[in-house]
Image (spheres, rainbow, N blue to C red):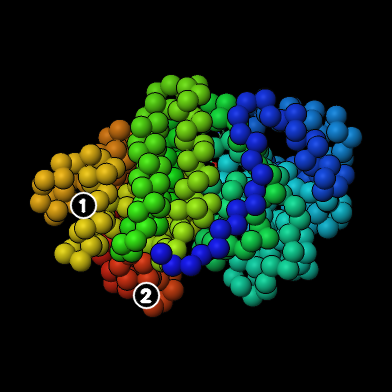
Amino acid sequence: MNNFTYDIPVKVYFGENQLGNLGEELKKYGKRVLLTYGGGSIKKIGLYDKIVAEIKNAGLELFELSGIEPNPRITSVNEGAEICKKEKIDVLLAVGGGSTIDATKFIGAGAYYDGDAWDILTGKTPVTNCLPIITVLTLSATGSEMDAGGVISNLDTKDKIGYIHPMLLPKVSFLDPTNTYTVSPYQTACGAVDIMSHIIEVYFNMNQDLYMLDTAAEGFMKTVIKYAPIAMKEPENYEARANLMWTSSWAINGFINGGKRQAWSCHPMEHELSAYYDITHGLGLAILTPRWMEYTLDETTVSKFYQFGCNVFGIDKDMEPMAVAKKSIAMLSDFFFNTLGLKSTFTEIGIDQDNFSIMAKKACGGSVLPGFKALKQQDIENIFKMCL
Ligand code: NZQ
Ligand code: ZN
């Protein structure tokens, strides 16, 4: 096992009726609170009123930024950063899914930068500081509630860029599964795929000495496979929503990385799809992942697929490794496209070949996408074609 540093200092309040702690937590960081949220789902589910009541009861001053888009735009980030500067905001409160939380991270960093926050995403300027962030999660998917990353879109340049910095980690996250009862079956499915993908990006690695982490990852994947269909059919099933929620956080909070050092593969490819076609992140991952698996499966990687097939899908260990590997990909496809009911091709979601070349070039940074298997531009174009 390689050396690694384990440091995930996010305080989590998990479960129902924990919002009573919100005021006390916010107060630790100051008086002036900027509440950030998306297109209004938090009002429909009654969460907005509860949050505002907690803030008022704590004697804090409330400012708001609403309308943060799915695939959040840099324009919203800059708008939020301006409010922080003008109103001398002390603490940020992000209430929503990954998009709201991601945007809030760069609002917090942008508040300390006199310029376009896009410069942070492109690496033109470093993160020097970040306002403290508290989150109330309403959708189990990205893990942004417990990780140090975020992904922002720029419509002008057709870029969607991810960025990670320890200062962006939320201080506190409130994870109440009942806040996800209203998430649609479609968004539940996309969230489930995103969680699966975060695990797959790390699990598919040829390191041989990580039994403990591999076993944890397999348990997390089995949790998603078990509970996502239940949450879709029974939106108010607490057990299902709770298991998905906690898995979403642990899939990407750094724990399963341990000593694994490997770049991700499907995410950089998917971010290009979202950048060019504004599709839901999890949907893009669902279409890409089985094709990426088919493309990377060969004699050098078959052992990992064999492990995946046997331990996650319970395929007979006595079958030939290559047969197990192929069956595991078929079973994952069946889970994504039949059980979760997601569309299975680019064609069905209106993506054609027109931008494959430029998207592939951007995904590999013009050279190579290192990962489970190194992918050059042509490899990525080939994978995109398999998705048509
Ligand atoms: O905007 P509102 O009205 O809130 O509606 C949202 C949005 O339309 C709705 N929603 C959220 N909670 C709900 C709800 N509807 C009903 N009831 C609720 N309780 O769901 C829609 C999608 O929300 P969004 O926040 O966009 O979804 P998600 O959490 O999947 O976030 C996706 C974004 O996160 C990025 C993705 O690329 C994408 O931009 N990612 C962030 C990562 C990270 N920070 O580490 C890693 C991921 O790989 C991912 O790239
Ligand atoms: Zn993701």
| Residue in view at x 29 percent, y 42 percent | 312
From where the camera sits, is residue 385 visible?
A: no
**Hey, which quadrant is residue 13 in on the image?**
top right
SS of the residue at dot 2? Answer: strand
Going by the picture, which residue comes out furthest to the bottom?
367
Which residue is denoted by mark 2 in the rendering? 368
Badge 1 marks a residue whose secondary structure is: helix
Q: Look at 23% across and 39% down and name the residue there.
A: 314
> How many numbered callouts?
2
Residue 222 spot, x, y in % from top left: 35, 38
Q: Is mark 1 within 8 Å of ligand 2?
A: no
> For mark 2, does the 10 Å Cα neighbourhood hold few (<14), some (14 to 19), or many (20 or more) residues?
some
Q: Is residue 306 left or right of residue 369?
A: left
Where is 299 relative to 333, above or below?
A: below
Q: In which quadrant is the N terminus drawn?
A: bottom left
Q: Please state if 355 lies on the left or on the right of 12 as rendered.
A: left
Mark drawn on residue 38? none
Q: How far from the left and from the top, in percent, is residue 131?
A: 76, 55
Q: Residue at x 22, y 45 (%)?
A: 310
Observer-nearest residue: 347 or 21?
Answer: 21
Q: Is residue 243 visible?
A: yes
User: With respect to residue 348, does 48 lie above or below?
Assistant: above
Q: Amino acid at mark 1?
A: Tyr
Depth check: give the residue in front, 357 or 52. Answer: 52
Quadrant hosting residue 269: bottom left
Give percent across and percent down for residue 145.
60, 46
Neighbor class of circle 1 (other Cα within 10 Å; few <14, some 14-19, many 20+) is many
**Residue visible at 71% across and 30% down in the picture:** 19
> Circle 1 sits on which residue?
306
2 and 1 marks in contact (CB < 8 Å): no
* Apparent side of residue 46 relative to residue 150 in the rendered image (left or right): right
